Image: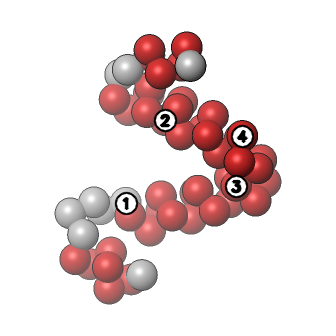
């Protein structure tokens, strides 16, 4: 994974993987899905995804 981090254009690749795994472990699949929608809304300024 570390080697992929060095080659990827996404600088936060490993942090995203870790965040997904921890969120899934703590909150389950529904919590992970909700967190991803919220993250998309915050970082992509697409609040329409929150209505789903």
Which residue corresponds to the image point at 58% horizontal and 56% vertical from the top-left? 20
Q: Residue furthest front?
A: 52
**N-terminal-most mark, 4 or 3:** 3
The Cα–Cα distance between marks 2 and 4, rounded to whole angstroms, is: 14 Å
- Label 4 sits on a secondary structure element that is helix
How many other residues sit within 10 Å of disc 2, few (<14), some (14-19) or many (≥20)?
Answer: some
Which label was assigned to residue 24? 3
Task: Say which residue appears at 38% left-offset and 32% top-offset.
Answer: 43
Left or right: 12, with 34 as reference point: left
Question: Alpha-carbon distance for marks 3 and 1?
Answer: 18 Å
Mark 2 element type = helix
| Label 4: few (<14), some (14–19) or many (≥20) C-alpha neighbours in 10 Å | few
For marks 4 and 1, the one nearer the N-term is 1
Residue occupying image coordinates x 63% and y 62%: 21
Q: Mark 1: which secondary structure?
A: loop
CA neighbours of label 1 inside 10 A, class few (<14), some (14 to 19), many (20+): few
Residue for badge 2: 39
Check contact, mark 3 vs mark 2: CB within 8 A. no
Q: CA distance from mark 3 to mark 2?
A: 15 Å
The answer to the question of whether label 1 and label 2 lie on touching residues, with beta carbons closer than 8 A, is no
As measured in the structure, the alpha-carbon distance from the residue carrying label 1 to the one carrying label 2 is 14 Å
Residue at mark 1: 12
> Label 4 vs label 3: CA separation?
8 Å
The quarter of the image holding the N terminus is: bottom left
Q: Position of residue 22 (x, y in %)?
A: 68, 60
**Residue marked by disc 4:** 30
Q: Nearer the viewer, mark 3 or mark 1?
A: 3
């Amino acid at each position: 994974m570390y080697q992929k981090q060095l080659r990827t254009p996404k600088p936060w690749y490993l942090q995203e993987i870790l965040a997904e795994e921890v969120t899934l472990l703590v909150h389950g699949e529904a919590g992970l899905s909700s967190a991803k929608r919220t993250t998309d809304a915050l970082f992509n300024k697409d609040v329409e995804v929150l209505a789903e």
